[in-house]
Image (tube, rainbow, N blue to C red):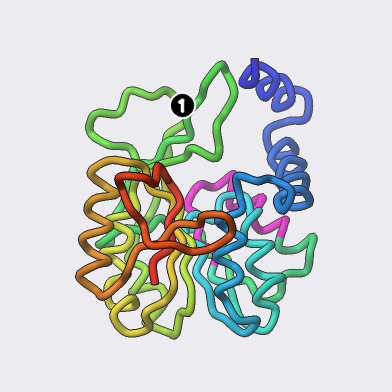
Amino acid sequence: MKNFIKYLLQQCLGYSNYLYVFAVFKIQTLRSDKKENDFFQFLDLLPSNASVADLGANIGIMTYHLSRWCSKGKIIAVEPIPDNFSILEKIIARYSLKNVKAINIALGNKSGEVEMLVPVMGKAKQQGLSHVVNSNEKSQGEVFKIQCKSFDEISNLEKIDGIKIDVENYEYPVLLGASETLKKHKPVIYAELWDNENRKNCFVLLESLGYKTFVCEKNKLVSFNPTIHKKQNFIFR
């Protein structure tokens, strides 16, 4: 039913208008969404002059909050999907987010080209589930060929205080491509990681770089214990 309603809205409003209206709505209501408490815990760790990378900026919902919180700093918002990036730019313009630099590119551990998919479920496009196509991909949707670079390359290793990363199970290659930045600046990282091989690889990589893994519990950061914490959102320090 949810996907059917989404499909009707996308048809009635037009896909681009739907994304824009949805982005504005979520920006205004994100703080009241208990599922996003972990993200705001991450914000609390950032000073107002922080430089933050929003990797997988999508349609700009969290970019907005990063920009407002780090009002004296700067935000690098990276989003590969053309429709999403268009809305990201509109959100930046609507709210005059002058400290945001938006980059329309995919991220990985090397330069080249990747195929990315915007899944379609119940005829509705799922912009929030856009991801790099893997060899076993069975999902249906709209496929794009996107230029890919490493984060180290696009950032020129400039100082980064924080990273928010949500790239739908492609976090390990992206973090590999940011290894020099992580070594040099030790930014605090907020990541959504599914319980699979990608998560394990991210843990190993970040632990090798000196990071410790935390989760949010009752509005406090506690060390991650896999036997008791069933989480997808993690903070690495």
Q: Residue at position x 39%, y 46% from top?
A: 229
Residue pictured at 57% horizontal, 81% vertical: 50
Would you identify the image quadrant in which residue 69 lies?
bottom right
Give the image location of residue 180, x and y in percent: 28, 78
Q: Which residue sits at x=49%, y=54%? A: 56
Left-right relation of 88 to 182? right
Q: Which residues are magenta?
A: 77-91
From the viewer's perspective, is residue 97 above or below residue 72? above
Question: Quadrant where the C terminus lies?
Answer: bottom left
Prevailing SS of the magenta stretch: helix
**Residue 33 lies in the magenta stretch:** no
Tag 1 secondary structure: strand
Q: Is residue 63 left or right of residue 227?
A: right
Is residue 90 shown in magenta?
yes
- Image check: 104 left or right of 31? left
Q: Position of residue 73 (x, y in %)?
A: 62, 82
> Residue 115 sits in which quadrant?
top left
Vertical order, 133 against 187 (above or below): above
The residue that disc 1 covers is: 141
- Residue at the spot 57% in from the left edge and 55% down from the top edge: 218
Pick the front one: 213 or 187: 213
Amino acid type, callout 1: Gly
